[in-house]
Image: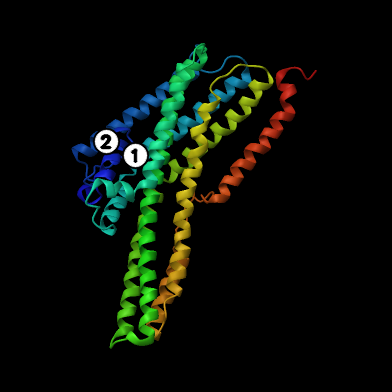
Amino acid sequence: MSGRIGQVLQCHLRFYQLLGLHGVPLSGGVQLSAKLWILRLWAGCLLGSFTTVVLMCVTSKDECLYKGDAFGRFNDGLKFGFAEIAVLSIYSESIWQRYPLARFWQLYAALAPSPAETVRLQLWQHWRFLITIYATIFLESLMITILFSQPGMGHHIVLFWTNFQPFVFVVHLRNTQFVLHLELLRQQLLQLEHELALLVEYSAFASDAASFLGYEEYMRRRVRQKQRIYQRIYELYNCFIQSFSYSVLTVLLMIYVRIAVDCYFMYYTIYNDINHIDYYLLLPAFLEIPAFIHVSQSCMQMVFRIAFQLHSIVVSSYAVSLQVQNFSLQLLHQPVRIDCLGITVLDSYLLTRVATAVCTYMIFTVQFMPKLSGSYY
């Protein structure tokens, strides 16, 4: 499998393996080989390390959590709690969900054409994913560098971000892993839509003057071939859902909780004249959810475009009409629907709900701030 996905994807999959996020050898095998055991053991060690850090921060008497007041300590503890849940789901899936992940890459290697001959063309093919991952790494590195280069940092700031930033880094890179798999799914849907568009043009041309003996049977076979391709793409989608079902929910939840908590606490510190210099570290988190939702929305919209092209085929016989109807029913009953365990669909409407929720609770925080600060009475 590794020879059919291109050097660019191989390089980034090895990077994810180094972080314990890709628990399948690049050969695509799922048998209990030495490589597979090493990957599982490495993911387990990383999970144990993150869990140990959380326990030390929560139980330590040092200033790992904010000690200025109970409200700030609760906020820091909340962020560590949801970060631990996200990391636990991420590495648990890396250890145990190896079959659907391996099947995903086997299907992609079978569906995708041969990789581009040059690395430059491969970079252009996957530019959406590459922008997402390198923008994430660059912003995280830039923000933390700016923070630690500032003079006069408090002991709590140093301790908190030294322990919490690895969680943020892993969670955000897991989000880029979602983007990678969905981008590959989108490419296959786009290729199918393009092939159907060519079939539409040919059917319109052949219906006028270029028909030939056996044309109806030829068109029926072509539509059936596209239907089989969509079936494999749908299996590709199912493998993605099975591989990342829990971590999609926990990663987005951790990012959302961090945005909400930091927004509340930012206003709280400003209201009480508490000097905090780490507000800008929230900037990369604001970009993670839109990046994931954009590619998720693109995948779901491609199905509607495929259905449009399918029904644009000029039907010249009952056999072709029946095959088109069969394909149409498959699109209806097997849609590509990206969601979090069926709880919510990851479309653009989710962004408005997240923004509305944060703004609503910010209003509550503003109203109760005098009570929290002790100046109410």
- The residue shown at (65%, 21%) is 270
Q: Position of residue 79 (x, y in %)?
A: 52, 28
Is 343 on the left or on the right of 177, as rendered?
A: right
Q: Is residue 57 visible?
A: no
Going by the numbered disc 2, the residue's amino acid type is Leu
Q: Which residue does the image show at 34% across and 44% down from the upper left?
A: 97
Label 2 environment density (alpha carbons within 10 Å; few <14, some 14–19, many ≥20): many
Q: Please indicate whether residue 268 sits to the left or right of residue 137 in the image.
A: right
Residue 171 horizontal/vertical position (percent): 43, 34
Looking at the rendered structure, which numbered label has been put on residue 214?
none
Q: Which mark is residue 94?
A: 1
Whole-percent x and y of residue 187? Answer: 36, 56
Distance (Cα) linking label 2 and label 1: 9 Å
| 342 or 304, nearer to the observer | 304
Residue carrying label 2: 39
Q: What is the secondary structure assignment of the residue under circle 2?
A: helix
Q: Do the CB atoms of the residues marked 2 and 1 lie less than 8 Å apart?
A: yes
Q: Which callout, 2 or 1, points at the residue further toward the start of the chain?
A: 2
Q: At 33% from the left edge and 61% from the top edge, which residue is drawn?
A: 232
